Amino acid sequence: MTTRRRNIARALAVSMTALFLVSTPVAASFAQPSESASNEIPTHTDDVCEPAVASSTTTTTTTTTAAPTTTTTTTTPTAVTCTPEAAASEQTNPSAAAPTTSAPPSTATETTGTPSPSGSSPAKTTAPAGKKIPYTGLPTENPNETIVPGKMRSDREEIPEGFTKEQADETEMMEARTQKQARTSRAAPGCQEYWPAPFQVCGAIRDKYNSLGAQFSFLLLPTSNELTSPDGHGKFTTFMNGPIYWSAAGGAHPVVNSFLNRWGVHGYETGWMGYPTTDEIVHADGIGRRQEFQHGAIYVSVPNAIGSSIGGAIRDKWNTVGAETPGSLLGYPMSDETPLVGNGRMNRFERGFIYWSPTTGAWPVTGSVLEKWAQSGSEAGQFGYPVGDQYSLDGDVTVKQNFQHGTVTAPGPKPIELSILNPGSAPQQIIDEAIRLADEVARSVADVIADGLIEARDAKFKSDGIGNSAPGQEIALPTPRGPGDIFYSRATTATANHGHNGIFVTMSHTVEAGDQSGVAMHDTVVAGGRKMLSPEMFWVNTSAGVRQNAVDFALSKVGLDYNYQFWSNKVVNAVAYNCSQLIWAAYYEASGMSVDLDSNKGTGVYPLDIRASSKVTPYP
């Protein structure tokens, strides 16, 4: 196992579950990458400090608006002579393994609120004889250059778990040498020790580490000296909870948890993503985070805790359709880029895909078009890759998308929404029913669906406060005044709060249409009565003859199936009925079309429409 692999493995020994807390991502413009799925980690080269950064030339800028959030560090290098320890090979110590659990960072952007140990006073380790003081985390006061039995800091102060007395004493002697160098050199010290870890943290990596809170941050204590990246340009230092990477192009940034794991899948800094250019960026939606790299980004979210990378033309297209922002077309990434036939690539998102090929470019495929295209074999099927966005020529009744070898047509957003508001109905059924109704009323299919959608939305709005979610008491249906009277009760049909209607055909029986039984007769007296949720009783303002004809009509429909489509249910002689359709049709037919119980005269009749009709009178 290479030294670098040991360090990364040590950093990953803790929990890698990312916290997720939306801002528009930073756009990236570069050639389509070839994703690397290898976990091979090249051996690092010599351990050399990168130039230290004087505090007077360090500027931190954090953007917290709705615009793309970035955190960058601009540094001006200054010459510095590193200590021998910083330039030496890594001092690997298996006993300094990471703890089994640790808290991930509450935020991953730069902060300066935590006091930096580098600016703290040296530890004053005074304790009663025979007792040690708790670990302070401060620099050692007057450190010993050699081991003095009984006089070392480790003899006076508790050593954090995972480190030995030998390591603590070595660190103290390193601190002494660093302080001595500082007294004899005009240059500021380029490196710093963090007792009891016998490693030096140097330059811009040290500055970043201190800005996060050093050993008191989510990174905890260092587990290596500064190392040179395999490309010979960047630097990194490992800590108990992950590394900090530095490059001239991107500055110094920690990469931890799911971000580190996903970055490693793609080859770390030598892979297509390159070096990190920001810390983790917490999104305002409370759902996700991202970290930017030179040639792409990694997104981690509640629905995708392991994270996914995205870059190139696919990311560019994703940004044009709202990226991950609330209400966007696609939502968060759910996969890395996946190679496809014909040198194509694909990323999966919460609500669809983006497909790319060298000859067609990048285009999203979603919804009903995606479903039909997938049934035909997707990009390997008869249609090939997409060559444009979806569009509609009929007011969103249908949507179309052009592909290399043809056009896919599928139900549009309006019939899809109408089918959701009429559970049990498929979008194509909505379109077929709209075509029938449009022929009857000499209107366009788009106008019929638009009217039906308006009424369905209104019915849902009114029913949401009256359906099963509203307060109500389940009681037995009252005794009717006579056959032909009707009732309304609070109820749901396939999760839609439409309410429920029924007609009394005798003093002890009703005929009702239900999604479980179809059109059926029910005994309202047996077993303590037919229980309904807060039933309301009505009589219809018409003659006794019309009421009896309505009873006969209802009885003649017993045994027929249930009709899930409320939005277009004003059909008298149908092969299936829902509850309000049955009552409306019974009185409409029985009265020779003079008693229309639909109070709003829309494309459909809902239970609340009958309850609100001026042609019914509630029981006193």
Image (spheres, rainbow, N blue to C red):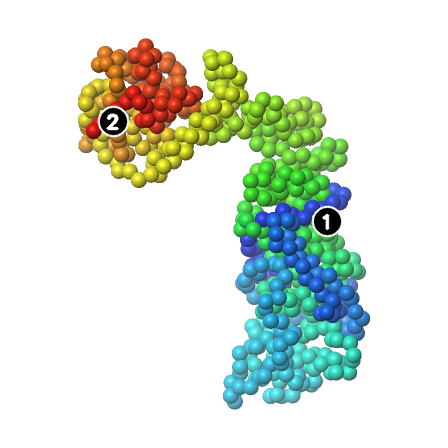
Q: Quadrant of the N terminus?
A: bottom right
Q: Nearer the viewer, residue 388 or 149?
A: 388
Q: Is residue 289 left or right of residue 385?
A: left
Type of the residue with mark 2: Pro
Crowd around label 2: few <14 · some 14–19 · many ≥20 (10 Å): few
Q: Is residue 223 left or right of residue 101?
A: right
Q: Is residue 602 above or below residue 268?
A: above
Residue pictured at 67% horizontal, 26% vertical: 402
Q: Nearer the viewer, residue 318 or 356?
A: 318
Q: Position of residue 44 (x, y in %)?
A: 75, 62
Which quadrant of the structure image shows residue 581? top left
Residue at the disc numbered 1: 295
What kind of element bears circle 1? loop
Residue pictured at 58% horizontal, 42% vertical: 331
Residue pictured at 53% horizontal, 21% vertical: 446
Which label sits on residue 618?
A: 2
